[in-house]
Image (cartoon, coloured by chain):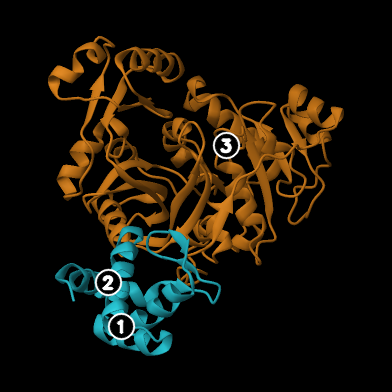
Chain colours: A cyan, B orange
Amino acid sequence: MTMAAAELLKELSKDDRLSRIAVSDTGFIFDPQTGQSFTLNKTGLVTLSHLKKGSSIDETADQLARQYGVTEEVALNSVEAFLLQLGRYL
Amino acid sequence: MLHENPMRETNWRRWNVAITGMNASPESPGPGFAVARSIREHRHFQGRIIGLGYDVLDAGLYSKTVCNGGYLVPYPSAGRDALLERIYQVHALEGLDAIIPCLDAELQNFIGIQSELNNLGIKMLIPTREQFTLRAKDHLSEFCRSIGVDAPETKTITNPLFFDECEAQGWQYPLMVKGIFYDATVARNSHEAKAIFAKLVHSWGYPVLVQKIIPGDEYDLAAIGDGHCRMLGAVMMRKRGLTEKGKAWAGVTVVDEAIGKVAEKIIRGLAWRGPLEVEVMKGYDGKIYLIEINPRFPAWIYLSHAVGRNLPAALLQTLANEPELDLSPPKPGTFFIRHAQELIVELDEFESLYVNGGISTPIQETHHTGLNDNEKFRAAS
């Protein structure tokens, strides 16, 4: 796991920022603090749901690996890439 | 023939409320109509709303769904005595309980006649002259330093030659060039800056302000200061769509604690009394910069009604000393998108305002003065 992704998750979890993000089943996301809205694909939606519940990056990668039948390494890379992209929107 | 009214209505729900700023040009609408609409749509309000305008084309005066009537008042340049005389006339016809001034340029005059209006039982929640001056654009940097709030560097200028030499003094283009009361335009070079300067001086007089641009996202907050350092009912909005002049034509409510804290500092620092709009830039450096403090409700204030925090109605409740304001918890994620709409005005309505300076519209009638429709304007003119 890279330090950048871990730091970012820590930052986004501060003051319940991540848990307050509004997520709809369609993948529509609204950040109540910045007023930004954007959409996620299905994998992104599943990933964000785990992170919002407080799962760590490793735990989220583990869940994705099992759900989508990929290796843990692939899942971990995907979660980290997703987090870095999310950080640019929030 | 002053309306003495010894039995003043104490219930704000039945008040006769006069509201200024009823102009509604698409590029830069006055806040008055949005204030009036918010009050009209409050579930408990049963009173009368009287629009006060400066021009026969101030659209809000003709609205049949919001205003019960409308009157022309003298332009602010006519001074406080002319305004007071006109308010006396309107009061004699309508029995006003409260006035909500909605334009920056008229506030000095309303501050100047507050004690006379108070003697008549007409309430206003407006700042003192000192509060009004402290938050003015040309004093803003100083005020921000005194309360520990970041603000973009701002300079007051009277000579347009500044724009030829400014880069050597550390003022790189693009720069924001602002009028003393209204208008702000981005200048990309000295040629543009001088043209904007000339236009602003023509419209608003000297001085003109130059402000460094902060890269970031703009947020606005509307609230009421109770005059005792307390902020009542903030509503925050992020601009989502801008007009050419940088005015919001679309926005969405947000909840940002850091912006709320800046607004609280401002209200505490000024002991602000009245409505206000705080414009901030959330810089990409993470800091919050105060751009402007407007001493009135903003034109997007109807959004406050939409999220259950009807600030214009809360202002009336504050004036009525209601112990609890009727405000829901902050609600992010509600959008507004402004659109222009044609208001149909019949010739006799236009004539009434043009010739007699007043118009009456037949909607909800409550504790009326008894005079009928446009007859009373003829009597008053």
Is B25 situated left or right of B141 in this image? right
Contact check, label 3 and label 2, Cβ < 8 Å: no
Residue that badge 1 annotates: A61
Q: Secondary structure at mark 2?
A: helix
Q: Secondary structure at mark 1?
A: helix
Question: Disc 1 is attached to a residue of which chain?
Answer: A
Q: CA distance from mark 3 to mark 1?
A: 52 Å
How crowded is the residue under tag 2: few (<14 C-alpha within 10 Å), some, or many (20+)? many
Inspect the image, locate mark 1, and give the three-letter code of the amino acid beneath it: Ala
Inspect the image, locate mark 2, and give the three-letter code of the amino acid beneath it: Glu
Residue at image point 26% right, 24% down: B173
Disc ID at residue B314: none
How crowded is the residue under tag 3: few (<14 C-alpha within 10 Å), some, or many (20+)? some
Tally of marks: 3
Question: Disc 3 is attached to a residue of which chain?
Answer: B
Task: Return the x and y of residue B76 as percentages of the image width and height.
Answer: 50, 25
How crowded is the residue under tag 1: few (<14 C-alpha within 10 Å), some, or many (20+)? many
Residue at image point 19% right, 25% down: B171
Between residue B344 and residue B227, name the one nearer to us.
B344
- The picture quadrant where one finds residue B185 is top left
Is B153 situated left or right of B252 in this image? left
Residue at image point 42% right, 55% down: B223
Residue that badge 2 annotates: A80
Where does the N terminus of chain B fall, quadrant-wise? top right
Task: Return the x and y of residue B181 as percentages of the image width and height.
Answer: 40, 29
Inspect the image, locate mark 3, and give the three-letter code of the amino acid beneath it: Pro
| Image: A55 above or below A13 | below
- Which numbered disc flags the more N-terminal residue, 1 or 2? 1
Between residue B204 and residue A77, name the one nearer to us.
A77
Q: Looking at the image, is mark 3 or mark 2 nearer the viewer?
A: 2
